[in-house]
Amino acid sequence: MLILDKTIDKEQLKGIEEDTYFDDMIKCVVDIDKELIAVNADLHSDLEQLLLDNGSDQHSLYGINILYDEWEIEYDSLINPPRNREAGFPRVGRYVADPAERQKIAEVVNKWIQI
């Protein structure tokens, strides 16, 4: 597990992955307020805790997956549901329903990872 502190490219991102269950994606948690991203764990909750331990606020955190085949962001994580309910979006669940929040997440990802 790692909080990125420098910009990396796709190949470096794939090189970070070690001993995780998934070989087609990397799990990440994004702090949209501090513009941080933690990467490389089996569970989003582990990355979530790493960011919380480093001063992030729970309501700023979103779990995502970066899929290697298409190099796309999958806005799906068990740590996401409270924000969906609070925003009043009809699709309550693991998916980040708010387009504005997805845009913020993508901006942070693109700040740290050249995909």
Image: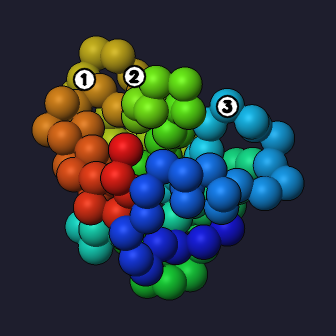
Crowd rating for badge 1 (residues with CA inside 10 Å; few <14, some 14–19, many 20+): few
Mark nearer the N terminus (2 vs 3):
3
Give the side of residue 90 with respect to residue 68, left or right.
left
Question: Residue 47, percent across and down?
Answer: 60, 62
Residue at x-position 56% and y-position 33%: 68
Residue at screen point 61% across, 45% down: 26
Task: Estimate the spatial distance between the alpha carbons at disc 1 and disc 2, rounded to whole Å.
Answer: 6 Å
Query: What kind of residue is marked 3?
Result: Asp
Which residue appears farthest toward the front when viewing the image?
11
User: In the depicted view, which residue is nearer to us: 92 or 6?
Assistant: 6
Residue 44 shown left or right of residue 64 in the figure: right
Q: Name the residue tied to disc 1.
A: 89
Pointer 2: residues within 10 angstroms few (<14), some, or many (20+)? some
Furthest residue in direction bottom, as rendered? 54
- Give the number of the disc on residue 24: 3
Left or right: where 76 falls relative to 107? right
Instruction: Identify residue for label 2.
Output: 92
Q: Residue at x 28, y 73 (%)?
A: 34
Q: In which quadrant will I find the N terminus? A: bottom right
Q: Amino acid at mark 1?
A: Phe
Does residue 61 appear in this view? Answer: no
Please identify the residue farthest to the top as the structure is shown.
90
Q: How many marks?
A: 3
Q: CA distance from mark 1 to mark 3?
A: 29 Å
